[in-house]
Image (cartoon, grey):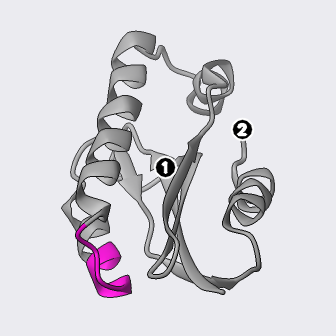
Amino acid sequence: MLGFYSLIQYQPNALREEGANVGVLLYTTDAGTWVKFSRNLEAVKRYFGAPLDTRRFELALEAMRARIEEESTAWKGVNDLKSFTLKEVNSLVLRPPRSTRFDDPQVELQRLYESRISL
């Protein structure tokens, strides 16, 4: 099966374009969309060496998940995912999609999570 994944990064300062990978989105036209987020907030705090408003961060993650779940039902192809990644303007950013081949979407989501999420 062909799919596309996009890393979800926390970027507290968009001008510097430095981010910590905090999640991954996997999309296929055949089987749907999956998202997995890290809950290791201590690692995010250490990564940037600055205070993190934990409640605000968790709300941002939930808002991102809700938007993905709502909007992905209308996606017809990877161009819709690309357009979605360009819409995000807060501290959670979706990186440009990359292609991947796999047999089981849930296994692939876990593999991507384990290999790409740096926290």
Whether residue 91 is visible, yes or no, is no
Please check the rendered image and state whether residue 79 is part of the magenta-colored stretch, yes or no: yes
Inspect this view and state whether residue 77 appears: yes
Which of the 4 image quadrants contains residue 85? bottom left
Q: Amino acid at mark 2?
A: Leu
Kind of element beneath mark 2: loop
106, above or below 97, in the image = above
How far is the residue under mark 1 from the one under mark 2? 11 Å
Instruction: Please indicate whether residue 102 sits to the left or right of residue 12 in the image.
Output: right
Q: In x, y percent, where is residue 72? A: 31, 63
Q: Which mark is residue 102?
A: none
Disc 1 designates what residue?
A: 9
Crowd band around label 1 with a 10 angstrom C-alpha radius: few (<14), some (14–19), many (20+): many
Q: Residue at x 26, y 47 (%)?
A: 67
Specify the quadrant that holds the C terminus. top right
Magenta extent: 74-82
Q: Is residue 81 magenta?
A: yes
Q: Nearer the viewer, residue 30 or 46?
A: 30
Quadrant location of the N terminus?
bottom right
Q: Is residue 65 left or right of residue 36?
A: left
Look at label 1 and name its amino acid.
Gln
The structure residue drawn at horizontal position 34% and vertical position 22%, both measured from the top left corner, is: 59
Nearer to us in this view, 48 or 4: 4
Marks 1,2: beta carbons within 8 A = no
* Residue at the disc numbered 2: 119
